[in-house]
Image: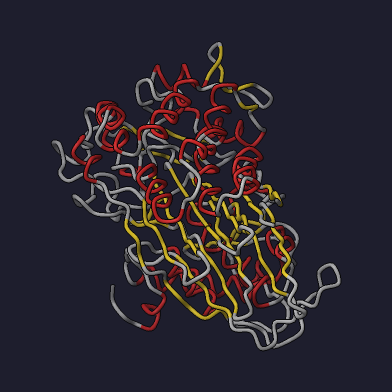
Amino acid sequence: MGGIAAGHRLTAQAGAEVLADGGTAVDASIAAMLTACVCEPVLASPAGGGFAMVSDGSKPTCLDFFVQTPKQASGKRYDGLREVDADFGGVTQTFHIGPGSVATPGFLPGLFALHERYGTLPMVRLAEFAITSAKEGVTVTAYQAKLATIVAPILTASADAKALHTRDGALLSAGDVFRNPALADALDAVAREGVRLATQGEIAHLMADAASGGHLSARDVSTYEAIWREPLIRMMPVQELPTKRSGGEDRSAAGQTRRLYTNPAPSAGGGLIAAVLATYDAGDRYDPLAFARALDSVDTRWRKLGKPVGFDDRMMVGEAASVASRGTTHVSVVDKDGRAVAITVSNGEGNGAIVPGCGFMLNNMLGEDDLLADGPGSWEPDQRLSSMMAPTLVADDKGGLLALGSGGSNRIRSAMAQVLLRWGVHGEPLEEAIRAPRSHVEEGHLDGEPGDDPEPLQRAFEDHRIWDESSMFFGGTHGVEQRVNADGRVSLEGAGDERRDGVFVRV
């Protein structure tokens, strides 16, 4: 028994097949993320980075394989940047792309670090599904086609990018088949020859060449290291009340102790989520207004502290102390032995350049306004960048376990906090907690999905927008839960967030 939740049917299928072959949750997560580079190319790339929270049955640990700033600037730090506008449907956002926007990738070193410590199946087996999918082609979904339309100026920013992502001058539409034989060859070579090919070999040099005119060097790529970190650990608030029943099972939380393990410093997302959970104050049922006020309180105090890198929720009581990842996707896995992985990756929006002969786009993390306190070009050399990404595990004292994470840039913290509160505090089944209406508060402005009573929110937040429908704006939270029932039986539930094409596959 096992399960995987992800942001694409094929991403989940790749992991599910590995679980069915006896692979671990880590094996499945690697296969899934390699496949995400094929079928979710706007969100995942071998030139991006991310984070993984891993439990092998003991205390969870966190792998930071996010991007690193170059060791030195080649010229002025804002050289090699250019602006493009992305249309989010009534809202236009300016991104910075070009060679000056590329940070040192950590994606492939991170997957190999996971495999070295926890993997059981050969890397060539884990890459099979992705390689086959890239060769034979994948059908473009409506969601992926929509994402491509939003970032069209990036996907057509260079001749190679345009050749890969368009046909007859037009972006691929839903139902079209997207083939990427160059990516298939690159993944096959890395799987067979090992990570050195991507850090010190031909692919490493090709990535540096593709960033020519910017700051990334072959030395940056060759010296990158994934870092194992201690998670940020907090007790989860639990209502000492009977909770909802699902399938006739008693979901009583009384007497349980739950620990939350989430992304630590230098990232900010985990600390912000923990702070929201600690600030939220409501009764027996989930209270959208209480949640919005908790979000607003944490956001206000965080900004007063200067939006510190490495935010820890203990800063909220007055201790003194740039955040990335708009284009993100997430995978949650629990295997038959109760091992779990929550893994989130990002390529920013991409910098517009395809690595020659490799079929994947470089990241644009040095062009992230949200990441750099003083804007693009204000980065410091040789530093790990911060992120809102917050892959999370929640464990109880009876053997229960939840793997959870989300895409969604600044909305990651609100999406995950709402799911954790609905599921963990108010006892809603995981699927209901993920599908429930969401809200997000930032700098005093509230965005809310339809479904909750809007009047209390509108009265409390004069600056607000109540959306007409559910939207990918509010994140894509995918989770898998292993529950140990009162009689000792183990059951498994999971859900993918429909806002971002999420699916759950049980094995």
User: What is the tally of numbered marks visible in this picture?
Assistant: 0
Q: Residue at x 49, y 39 (%)?
A: 34
From what the image shows, is residue 19 above or below residue 209?
Answer: below
The colour scheme of the drawn protein is secondary structure
Nearer to us in this view, 83 or 471 = 471
Q: Is residue 209 above or below residue 388?
A: above
| Image quadrant where residue 153 sits | top left
In the image shown, does 174 or 393 lie closer to the viewer? 393
Tell me the quarter of the picture where residue 202 sits.
top left
Q: Position of residue 165 (x, y in %)?
A: 51, 22
Quarter in which the N terminus is drawn: bottom right
Horizontal and vertical percent for residue 253? 70, 82
Q: Is residue 208 left or right of residue 493?
A: left
Q: Pick out the residue farthest to the right.
A: 248
Question: Depth check: 138 or 453 in front?
Answer: 138
With respect to residue 255, does 294 lie above or below? above
Judge from the rendering whether residue 259 lies leftward or rightward of residue 204; answer left or right. Answer: right
Residue 179 at what x, y percent from top left? 55, 21
Against 199, residue 140 (above or below) is above
In this picture, residue 452 sits left or right of residue 111: right
Task: Report the residue at 59% width, 83% height from top.
Answer: 257
In the image, what residue occupies the spot 46% across and 48% down? Answer: 345
x and y, in percent, of residue 232 in the image: 42, 72
Q: Which residue is drawn at 49% across and 50% down?
A: 120
Q: Is residue 38 left or right of residue 154?
A: right
